[in-house]
Image: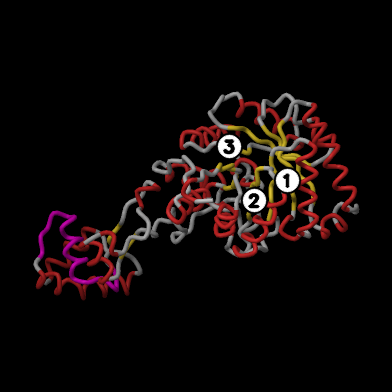
């Protein structure tokens, strides 16, 4: 299939798997605001909680669904009758019923057999459908599952009435080429929608998610800022921009106001954003090196791989140890001061000395002092 003719559904799980990060707990007000902002950006699906966590969690799920946002609302549940019963009357559109798919989990976590897993899927999906719930069957630890068994797993889910299967790289051990092969194989085995759920333990969650999309996945799990258990999940911003820029695949999501949501989630989670974090770090669109600054001033495309405006950002040209005269001229022009090349060449050593000594960019008042001394 021509990738550029495809669309992908983003199922953002900031409010579920994002909140499962160690030490993270969103207030109801924070959850509601995150949901509103995600909806405003055009995110079509939100995974909003785990009903079995208790009455407060279920009340918060109801509060989110009561917003009547233009999103499909998803809840997560273990594939157990007691958990499933708690998913009723929450106004959720879909339940992800999760059960282990790998022999490691089946034998050493569930203490069961493959046959038991398949029979449980048959029984529980039917029960969920009888409750009026649409079902995604979550294949926990799918990345370590036997491919032939995973195909039977999907066939069983489809026959029982599920609409989707979630391929979970639960412990974050996959790489893009393996994901490509695994999702293609699963795509050939089932007509179900396929959702990719990646973890970033090896720093490959976004790459694996993009590979799944190329291989035929229809839905992708993401979180704002890549928040999530352990090393986190695939970042919403990276996946949306990557799909568009690398493959021409649209999600319908507008990230122009993303910085506000990114900052809010960082503050609500207590999770600091690194200055070099792709797309959202404070320094990722900053340029110091003289050759880069000169090239950008001539034509942004000389050193622009990603247009920062797609995520509500802009380029910043800063002065530092590796600056050149064009950078100095530009910095003073921003202050309303016009320098010639001779003046810029005189100021440049002072800038380099200052940055080496103070480990920071000079302020406007300091630039003014430099100019007065040359």
Where in the figure is residue 245, as x and y percent of width and height?
Answer: 42, 54
Badge 1 element: strand
Residue 340 percent location from the top left of the image? 9, 67
The answer to whether mark 1 and mark 3 are in CB contact below 8 A is: no
Marks 1/2 in contact by CB < 8 Å: the verdict is yes
Q: Name the disc covering residue 257, or none.
A: none
Q: Are marks 3 and 2 in contact (CB under 8 Å)?
A: no
Q: Give me the residue at 65% from left, 64% from top.
A: 178
Comparing 345 with 179, the one in front is 179
Q: Residues within 10 Å of mark 2 (few under 14, many from 20)?
A: many
Res 121 → quadrant:
top right
Residue closer to the observer: 302 or 367: 302
Could you tell whether 111 is left or right of 331 in the image?
A: right
Q: Is residue 162 magenta?
A: no
Would you say 151 lies left or right of 16 here?
right
Q: Position of residue 86 (x, y in %)?
A: 78, 30
User: Badge 3: few (under 14), some or many (20 or more) residues near its Cα, within 10 Å?
Assistant: many
Give the extent of the magenta segment. Answer: 320-339
Q: Residue, x 58% and y 35% (percent of image)?
A: 31
State which tag comes first along the sequence, 3 or 2: 3
The percent coordinates of residue 287 (x first, y second) are 31, 64
Q: Which residue is mark 1?
A: 138
Is disc 2 placed on a helix, strand or loop? Answer: strand
Q: Which quadrant would the C terminus be assigned to in this image?
A: bottom left
* Residue pictured at 54% horizontal, 35% vertical: 35
Say which label, 1 or 2, has the lower sequence index: 1
Q: Do we see residue 50 in this rendering?
A: no
Asked which quadrant contains residue 201, the reply is bottom right
Residue designated by label 3: 45
Q: Against 163, is 4 above or below?
A: below
Compared across the picture, whether 250 is left or right of 352 comes to: right
């Amino acid at each position: 299939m021509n990738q550029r003719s495809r669309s992908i559904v983003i199922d953002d799980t900031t409010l579920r798997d994002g909140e499962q990060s160690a030490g993270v707990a969103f207030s109801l007000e924070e959850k509601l605001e995150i949901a509103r902002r995600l909806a405003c950006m055009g995110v079509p699906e939100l995974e909003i909680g785990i009903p079995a966590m208790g009455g407060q969690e279920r009340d918060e799920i109801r509060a989110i669904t009561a917003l009547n946002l233009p999103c499909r609302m998803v809840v997560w549940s273990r594939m157990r009758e007691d958990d499933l019963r708690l998913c009723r009357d929450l106004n959720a559109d879909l339940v992800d019923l999760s059960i282990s798919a790998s022999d490691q989990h089946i034998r050493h976590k569930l203490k069961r057999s493959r046959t038991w897993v398949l029979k449980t899927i048959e029984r529980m999906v039917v029960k969920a459908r009888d409750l009026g719930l649409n079902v995604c069957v979550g294949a926990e630890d799918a990345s370590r599952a036997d491919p032939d068994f995973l195909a039977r797993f999907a066939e069983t889910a489809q026959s029982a009435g599920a609409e989707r299967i979630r391929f979970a790289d639960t412990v974050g051990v996959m790489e893009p080429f393996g994901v490509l092969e695994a999702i293609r194989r699963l795509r050939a085995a089932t007509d179900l929608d396929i959702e990719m759920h990646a973890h970033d333990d090896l720093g490959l969650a976004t790459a694996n998610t993009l590979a799944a999309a190329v291989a035929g996945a229809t839905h992708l799990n993401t979180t704002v800022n890549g928040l999530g258990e352990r090393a986190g999940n695939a970042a919403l911003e990276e996946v949306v921009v990557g799909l568009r820029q690398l493959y021409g695949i649209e999600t319908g999501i507008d990230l122009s106001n993303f910085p506000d949501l990114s900052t809010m989630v960082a503050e609500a989670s207590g999770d600091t954003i690194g200055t070099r974090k792709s797309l959202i770090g404070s320094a990722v669109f900053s340029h110091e090196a003289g050759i880069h600054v000169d090239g950008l001033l001539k034509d942004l495309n000389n050193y622009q791989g990603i247009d920062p405006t797609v995520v509500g950002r802009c380029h910043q040209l800063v002065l530092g140890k590796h600056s050149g005269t064009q950078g100095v001229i530009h910095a003073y022009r921003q202050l309303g001061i016009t320098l010639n090349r001779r003046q810029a060449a005189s100021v440049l050593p002072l800038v380099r000395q200052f940055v080496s000594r103070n480990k920071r960019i000079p302020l406007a008042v300091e630039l003014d002092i430099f100019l007065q001394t040359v």
